[in-house]
Image (tube, coloured by chain):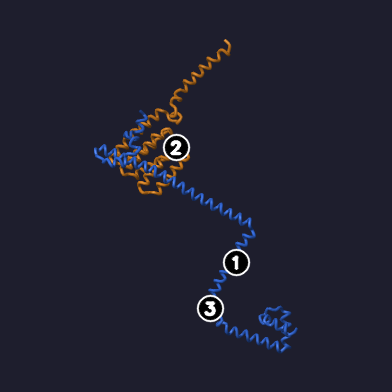
Amino acid sequence: MDCKSCTEDMTAYLDGELNRARFREIEGHLEGCLPCLEELESLKRSGRLVESHLPELEPKPEIWNNLTAKIAAAQETKRRGGLLSFCAAHRWKAAAAAIAASVVLATGLWGFWNHQQSEKALRQYMSEYIQKRDSHIHATRARASDARGETRTADSDHAEYSDNPFVEVRAEPFDNPFRSEAQ
Amino acid sequence: MSPARNFHPRLFLFAAALTFLTLPFILAGPEFQAGSQPAELGKMRSIAESQHEIVMSLIRKKEFSQALSEANKIFQLNWPPNQEAPLRKDLLYFADQFLHGGQAAIGLQLLETNLKAFKNNASRAAILKEKGYLHKNMGQEDKAIECFREAQRLEKIDK
């Protein structure tokens, strides 16, 4: 073994990363080569120096924040690039996915619209009946008021009862349904 | 006399006898088809007529709880299906009378109790609409909407 080869693997030798045969070769060379032994001692000293100053080399929090932000940005770029590259590589799959998404969206919108329409129809159905019943109640009260001999004003007559369909329909007082049909 | 010449008078006699025997049932019409005898139905209608007058009298006297109890008796009778129309008319009329008397809750109770006596979709829809109206009058908007929704569904089935 020559000195150059020994120096190249010296750091690995110190870190215990070499296999058994290589380790013995370097060990044998170091026993007979003073410059390489000095080089080894120098490396050891450097290592100890770094270890002794390690607390001073602790990175500041700002550095970690910057690093984290850069990593996140890099990942985002990679993700976007990934989706675009997936679309470019699998055009048919991307098109099918887009169509499926459109169908789902359209179905959802149609369902929502349909629900809105049916609710609107229900409200109308409800308000028609309520209006009909309210006008019937007004008419019944008016008849009761007339029966008691109270006088209503012309304005209230016109405003409330002129278009009431029940005034004509139920002009006759309600009779017992069983009696009327039996006769 | 040959058998061929005797056939027609015998057939005529048989048809006449058959008609005579089935005539009462044909004339009874729907009441017979519904499974109630006319006499029994007449009795039920007479009871209902009296009950109606009793209920109206109690409402006029503002004895609403008693009126509700008496009204329920009308609908608890074993009515044939073809009597739904007068029953429905009476039920809605009573509910209206309770509402006029400021007793919407009792009217509602009357409708809820007797809805099950009605099998026809149109009748059930009419009762449910009135029920919804009473709920609305009592400020129960959600229950009113549910009643109207069900009534609308029943009417759609009939269409």
Chain bearing tag 2 is B
Q: In this view, which residue lies farthest toward the right?
A: A1
Colour for chain B in the figure: orange
Query: Earlier along the polypeptide chain: callout 3 or callout 1?
Result: 3
* Residue contact at pointers 2 and 1, CB within 8 angstroms: no
Q: Nearer the viewer, residue B137 or B117?
A: B137
Looking at the rendered structure, the kind of residue marked 2 is Asn
Q: Which residue is mark 3?
A: A60
Q: Position of residue A125 (x, y in %)?
A: 42, 43
Mark 3, residues whose alpha carbon is within 10 Å: few (<14), some, or many (≥20)? few
Looking at the rendered structure, the kind of residue marked 3 is Lys
Q: Which residue is mark 1?
A: A78
Looking at the rendered structure, the kind of residue marked 1 is Lys
Q: Position of residue B17 (x, y in %)?
A: 49, 19
Disc ID at residue A168: none
* Residue contact at pointers 2 and 3, CB within 8 angstroms: no
Quadrant of the image containing the C terminus of chain A: top left
Q: Position of residue B30 (x, y in %)?
A: 44, 29
Q: Which chain is displayed in blue in the rendered image?
A: A
Mark 2 residue element: loop
User: For the residues carrying marks 2 and 1, which lies nearer the camera in this image?
Assistant: 1
User: For the residues carrying marks 2 and 3, which lies nearer the camera in this image?
Assistant: 3
Q: Residue at x 71, y 81 (%)?
A: A23
Q: Would residue A40 be found to the left or right of residue A151 on screen?
A: right
Q: Is residue A24 above or below residue B23?
A: below
Q: Is residue B130 above or below residue A8?
A: above
Mark 1, residues whose alpha carbon is within 10 Å: few (<14), some, or many (≥20)? few
User: For the residues carrying marks 3 and 1, which lies nearer the camera in this image?
Assistant: 1
Q: Would residue B26 be found to the left or right of residue B66 on screen?
A: right
Q: Is residue A138 above or below residue A13?
A: above
